[in-house]
Amino acid sequence: MRTVDEHRAAVAALLKPTPIETRPLAEALGLVLAEELRAAVSLPPFDNSAMDGYAVRAADVADATEAAPVRLPVTTDIPAGRTDHPTLAPGTAHRIMTGAPMPDGADAIVQVEHTDGGPPGGEVRIDRAVAPGQHLRRAGEDVSAGELVLPAGVDLGAARIGLAAAVGVAEVRVHRPARVLVLSTGSELVPPGKPLRHGQIYESNGVMLASAAREAGAVVEQLRFVPDDVPEFLAVLGERLGPGHEDGPVDLVLTSGGVSAGAYEVVKDALAKRGVEFIRVAMQPGGPQGAGRLTRLAGPASVKTQTADYPAVVTLPGNPVSSWVSFEVFVRPALRAAMGHPDSARPVVWASLGEELRSPVGKRQFRRGTYDPSSNTVRTVGGPGSHLLSALARANCLLILPEETERHEVGNRVEVWLL
Ligand code: AMP
Ligand code: MG
């Protein structure tokens, strides 16, 4: 029997770093930057107005008050986007908008609210003095040209993508998303939307695992699920991975079901001699697991893909909660690490246990829970049963009960992964 950590390491070792590619910035959300970004321009690139109002020389309005306003001729209008270099003559004002370039000779902005809004060609009444530099945004105040704005290894969220665009970046070098195939097995399975007969259930792991892999940042293809039939299972894999069917690289094949100790363990039967090792992991749920590289499909046909490597295979158990927990524990961190993510694990907190619990000695138990940040308390939702999908859907965390302890008392500190 493997420990959880041993199997985690085995799965992580299967997933190599994904190659680096160039992408338009707009297609880089959630990906990890592979090369640092330096600013081609300063931010702001030029001195500009922080307000709608009037560009002036502060000295010209130094005595302005509401009781004794100063009147200045408005000699031109500077909307945002004006690209020439107007010059402000002493004793005059330019009407100016937020983000418009400061005219030469001006050193402050009077907000429009402190004026009568006088038009270009006319006169403006100014009711308030301003200090030199007021309401002015200086070139380079935010970023200097040449400065490092984003180091390699950060993930690209909305704000970082915005910053990259602001310094003129159109394309970025990123770790490409991992490509994942999902294949469910089970003769009892029926696609949602079709009528169920007695003994049948709806196929839910496929779309759940595909969604989990997408949430982790992978690109996913969900293959049509198969009954517990080895030739059909291999045929579906062969349609995607066999010679002549290489529709792009595959980093990982994820299967569901057919790996435990029953009589019709299709995944085990099909893949045990094709490069995948089937073992038991000391955990609950999710004991039966398998991992390896798919070296062969039907007959002698090799499945070497365009990655010039055999795709990694992780075979997850069929019980929905086991499948999902196994994905969280083994697959998600490995996938994210392969895509270069600095935070491949879920955020961990240590919380106070809100109820008494028992867990089997010798196994690490992953219970579904609700974490309350205001009291730093965690409670379980639903029992330990690995078929209790509705409780999983209500959970906001996983609660980890270690191998060596059977009794967990109220108030004990327990490890919690926030989902
Ligand atoms: P298995 O691991 O194939 O023995 O399946 C264990 C349990 O999970 C059985 O009750 C199956 O019916 C159920 N199961 C397996 N695959 C799926 C699936 N894709 N969707 C929903 N339930 C499944
Ligand atoms: Mg099955």
Image (spheres, rainbow, N blue to C red):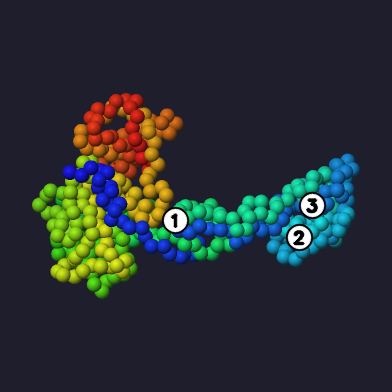
- Mark number, residue 78: 2
Q: CA distance from mark 3 to mark 2?
A: 15 Å
Indicate which disc, 1 or 2, sits on the residue closer to the N terminus. 1
* Label 2 environment density (alpha carbons within 10 Å; few <14, some 14–19, many ≥20): many
Would you place residue 50 above or below residue 356 in this image?
A: below
Q: Residue at x 79, y 47 (%)?
A: 132
Q: Is residue 186 visible?
A: no
- Label 1 – label 2 distance at C-alpha: 40 Å
Q: Quadrant of residue 375?
A: top left
Instruction: Name the residue located 22 percent from the left edge and 61 percent from the top edge.
Output: 294
What kind of residue is marked 3?
Asp
Amino acid type of the residue tagged 1 in the rendering: Val
**What secondary structure is marked by label 3?**
loop
Which residue shows up at 76% across the image and 47% down it? 134
The spot of residue 378 in percent (x, y) is 36, 32
| Element class at badge 1 | loop
Comparing 271 with 395, the one in front is 271
Q: Residues within 10 Å of mark 3 (few under 14, many from 20)?
A: many
Whole-Å distance between the Cαs marked 1 and 3? 42 Å
Residue ID for mark 3: 107
**Three-letter amino acid code at disc 2?**
Ile
Quadrant of the rendering where the C terminus is positioned: top left
* Residue 308 x/y as whole percent: 29, 67
Q: Which mark is residue 32?
A: 1
Q: Nearer the viewer, mark 1 or mark 2?
A: 1
